[in-house]
Amino acid sequence: MNKIQFFGANWCPDCQRAKAYLKGNNIDFNFVDVDLDKEATSRVEAINNGKRIIPSLIINDKSYTNPDNSVLANILGINEQGRVILYGADWCPDCQRAKSYLQDNQINYQFIEIDKYDWAAQKVEQINNGKRIIPTIIINGKSYTNPDNSVLKEVLQIGKESELKVYDCIIIGAGAAGLTASIYIQRDRFSSLILEKKNIGGNAFLTEKIENYPGFTSISGPELTHRMAEQAKVYGAKIETGVVVKSIEAKNNLIDLQTNMGVYRSKTVLLALGSTYRRLGIPNEEDLIGAGVHFCATCDGPFYRDREVIVIGGGNSALEEGIFLSKFCKKVIIVNQDETFTASKTYVEKLPSIKNIEIHMNKESIEFTKNKSGNFRGLKVKDQKNKEESELLADGAFIFIGLLPNTDLVKDVVALNKRGFIKTNGLAETSVKGIFAAGDCREGAIAQVAAATGEGVLASYGVRNYFK
Ligand SMILES: Cc1cc2nc3c(=O)[nH]c(=O)nc-3n(C[C@H](O)[C@H](O)[C@H](O)COP(=O)(O)OP(=O)(O)OC[C@H]3O[C@@H](n4cnc5c(N)ncnc54)[C@H](O)[C@@H]3O)c2cc1C
């Protein structure tokens, strides 16, 4: 076969897409930049009846105008069967979870960063009806949108040990509390396993900067929790991500955990379940989640570089994340339903000095609005005093209005308080013998990383005491 002649330009997304595809399949080609070579421009026009369409490829003396990857696969005999292509980004927790799962199971895959290639971002949007949802994974030519590990397990037919091992302690949740507990439990020579439904790090993973964790003037949440996990692994801790614990049953001094990946068995269980973002419960919220409405600035903020966003809330998270977004967004509109902020003074006092933050107090959020194409348009608000309604226009919105404990799983297993937090005694014991709780899911937790690590230590002492 003659060397492929590739007429294109560096700014052209489809050229980038086709180049990446050829490179990814180790296919050699000669790239001719039409912006730099007038002769090449005339050649492209000749191929395309006077039109300047790129990429134009000449393969074995035959010309192809903007062929998509499946056309290239056909012409070049590239076998799409057995190929796993993961479209994602380094900052995306679910991409990390899926990547770890594929790596742990020795599955070869091609990782394409959508932040680097416009064509890749467009491809993801095209697959997901206009929504930029990652990871989007192509397996044997079929696309899967953010598949959880059980889906990957099934599609890729990944086997699992059938023997049911009995652990001394299974920890549910790989946040600060669970990771710290595992360091102590492993050092006490008990066998332990952490089951985590998402990625390692819990809520701290979502925090760009932690400035109040002892020993570090400033450290990112992912870096801090990564260090915790590495420390736990030094002592032999095992962590399985992508495992959703669905139910817990304690009988005959053993506890069975039903998960999306099968049954696990343990002598004790530590609930380090953390908490989740509260939603507004207003029209169009559900529909726009992930496509205009978000709960994590660190995760989704980069989509809004140089664009305008709304931040809803008035507590520490809202202001901290609003200030973070203001560093790279064109404008941040903070909407607070009360007359004053409940956030700490440090954040409130910073606000006036930030020029691209606009504040709307006393405004109740009543509806997310959409444009004619059904995409995010803005937020309808109602003034709490004069009851007038108005619409704030932006490119996206971030909701930070508090956290709910992730305790649905155990609502019929251990005693909870009225707000759903787990009741414990001084040794982190719940109402059921052998089941412990630590961190943000526990009644009285103060929702800080340092506090969660301390609670992890306490729970490990509870486990040690149990085995005594
Ligand atoms: C935006 C934001 C900013 C913050 N900033 C700071 C800060 O600057 N300083 C600070 O000290 N604290 C901060 N915090 C608070 C801090 O992150 C939390 O207090 C801390 O992470 C709690 O740790 P945890 O282990 O209790 O729970 P989490 O970190 O919430 O971890 C719980 C884990 O359990 C997993 N899980 C839950 N249910 C299941 C299930 N059924 N099966 C499997 N896994 C499950 C979850 O996926 C999660 O990973 C911030 C929090 C947020 C949201």
Image (cartoon, grey):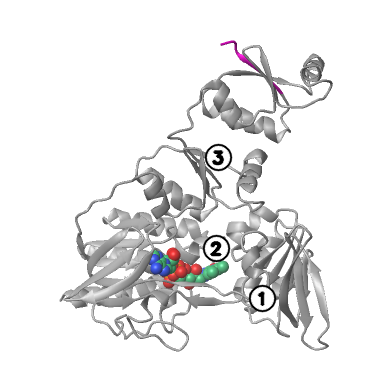
Q: Quadrant of the N terminus?
A: top right
Q: Is mark 2 on a helix, strand or loop?
A: loop
Mark 2–mark 1 Cα distance, whole angstroms, equals: 26 Å
Foreground pick, 264 / 187 = 264
Q: What element carries label 1?
A: loop
Q: Which residue is denoted by mark 2 in the rendering?
A: 207
Q: Which amino acid does label 1 sit on?
A: Ile
Q: Quadrant of the C terminus?
A: bottom left
Taking 257 as reference, is 303 left or right?
right
The answer to whether one can see residue 334 in this image is: yes
* Residue 5 on the magenta segment: yes
Mark 3–mark 1 Cα distance, whole angstroms, equals: 35 Å
Name which of mark 2 and mark 1 comes first in the sequence.
2
Range drawn in magenta: 1-7
CB of mark 2 near ligand 1 (< 8 Å): yes
Q: Which residue is denoted by mark 3 in the rendering?
A: 112
Please identify, in this view, whether the residue under mark 3 or under mark 2 is nearer the observer: 3
| Count of marks, rendered view | 3
* Residue 272 on the magenta segment: no
**To which quarter of the image does residue 157 belong?**
top left
Q: Which amino acid does label 3 sit on?
A: Ile
